[in-house]
Image (cartoon, rainbow, N blue to C red):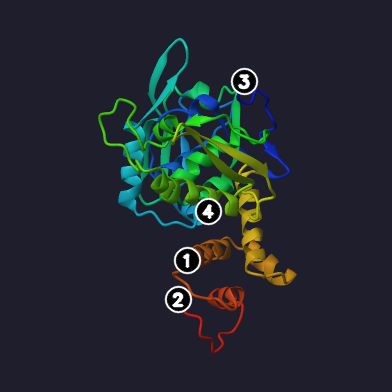
């Protein structure tokens, strides 16, 4: 079975899709969840018409609001430093390319912004996308907390128009997940298949099925008495989360995302919605509130929308048990 050869639209009615050349999807590399979130956000900003030397601005607060995860300043510094030194290994019949993703990362103090510059050697794989593509949803990529789930979701997305992936040896899959050193220098992780299933495969399947547009399963294949290979079954499903509107102009995207957050809080009164969306300060308050709610810094199980309206002064405080 071959990889996908067709190219679908960059944006669709079901939301933005990030594109990765299949050589990137199946390359050997290791990343933390924080690094992956930065990469997914960066990929959402890339456009085919970008010129060499383009800088991409990642807003830290936007990234945190979108992912529902809080990364401290030191973690971001470590993540971008690692992305500059960590390499993709892309191999075909003619060559082996060792390449880093980032040429530079610059933090703008006081603005909460990181300016990223991609390496020119990797640009053709990310931008000049002519064939053999993988597409996967940004919202889904962000919603997966396990780094193994993120990688397996990428692999499964490569075959989403099929009912099953190609068969991977457990050796090759572990190498792609950075659980095994292909040179045998470092110790292999989860050497027992039962542990590999429990801590990697089953966690990934659960997260992918609950949070993405794919529903997957897997089959372990024996050679003799031992499991040697694996293949994943794939069905497409309607994701529970609305897509993120990155393809729109920044202001329109921000308004649409704010509308989505208001719906999640069950705030539907037209007058209140118009007032909130009409003030930049209130939109900032909305994103901050939803982020704190998602990360447990605000407890509001019964009526989070009412609590938000109270916080921003659109509803008088009542004697409630909800608390920050």
Residue, disc 2: 324
Label 3 environment density (alpha carbons within 10 Å; few <14, some 14–19, many ≥20):
few
State the separation of the CA atoms marked 2 and 3.
50 Å
Q: Are the two marked residues, 2 and 3, in contact with CB atoms closer than 8 angstroms?
A: no
Q: Residue at x 31, y 44 (%)?
A: 78
Q: As drawn, which residue projects farthest toward the left? A: 185
In the rendered image, which quarter is residue 19 located in? top right
Please identify the quadrant where the C terminus is shown: bottom left
Q: Are the two marked residues, 4 and 2, in contact with CB atoms closer than 8 angstroms?
A: no
Q: Residue at x 61, y 22 (%)?
A: 2
Q: Which mark is residue 292?
A: 1
Disc on the earlier residue, 1 or 2 = 1
Q: Position of residue 256 (x, y in %)?
A: 66, 54
State the separation of the CA atoms marked 1 and 3.
41 Å
Disc on the earlier residue, 1 or 4 = 4
Label 2 environment density (alpha carbons within 10 Å; few <14, some 14–19, many ≥20):
few
Q: Which mark is residue 130?
A: 3
């Amino acid at each position: 079975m071959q990889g996908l050869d067709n190219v679908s639209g960059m944006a669709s009615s079901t939301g933005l899709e990030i594109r990765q050349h299949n050589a990137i999807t199946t390359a050997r590399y290791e990343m933390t969840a924080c690094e992956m979130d930065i990469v997914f956000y960066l990929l959402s900003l890339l456009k085919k018409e970008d010129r060499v030397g383009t800088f991409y601005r990642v807003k830290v607060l936007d990234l945190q609001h979108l992912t529902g995860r809080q990364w401290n300043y030191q973690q971001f510094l470590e993540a971008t430093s690692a992305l500059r030194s960590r390499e993709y290994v892309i191999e075909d019949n003619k060559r082996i390319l060792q390449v880093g993703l980032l040429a530079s990362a610059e933090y703008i103090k006081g603005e909460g912004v990181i300016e990223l510059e991609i390496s020119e050697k990797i640009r053709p794989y990310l931008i000049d996308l002519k064939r053999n593509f993988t597409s996967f949803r940004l919202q889904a990529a962000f919603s997966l907390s396990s780094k193994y789930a993120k990688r397996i979701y990428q692999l499964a997305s490569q075959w989403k128009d099929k009912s099953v992936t190609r068969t991977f040896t457990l050796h090759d899959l572990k190498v792609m997940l950075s659980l095994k050193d292909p040179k045998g220098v470092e110790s292999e992780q989860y050497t027992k298949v039962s542990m590999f299933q429990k801590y990697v495969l089953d966690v990934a399947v659960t997260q992918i099925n609950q949070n993405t547009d794919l529903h997957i399963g897997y089959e372990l294949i024996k050679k003799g008495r031992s499991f040697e290979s694996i293949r994943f079954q794939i069905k497409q499903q309607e994701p529970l989360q609305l897509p993120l509107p990155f393809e729109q102009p920044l202001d329109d995207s921000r308004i649409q995302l704010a509308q989505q957050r208001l719906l999640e809080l069950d705030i539907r009164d037209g007058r209140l919605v118009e007032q909130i969306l009409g003030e930049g300060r209130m939109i900032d308050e909305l994103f901050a509130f939803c982020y704190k709610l998602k990360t447990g810094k605000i407890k509001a199980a019964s009526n989070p929308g009412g609590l938000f309206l109270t916080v921003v002064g659109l509803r008088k405080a009542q004697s409630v048990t909800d608390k920050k």
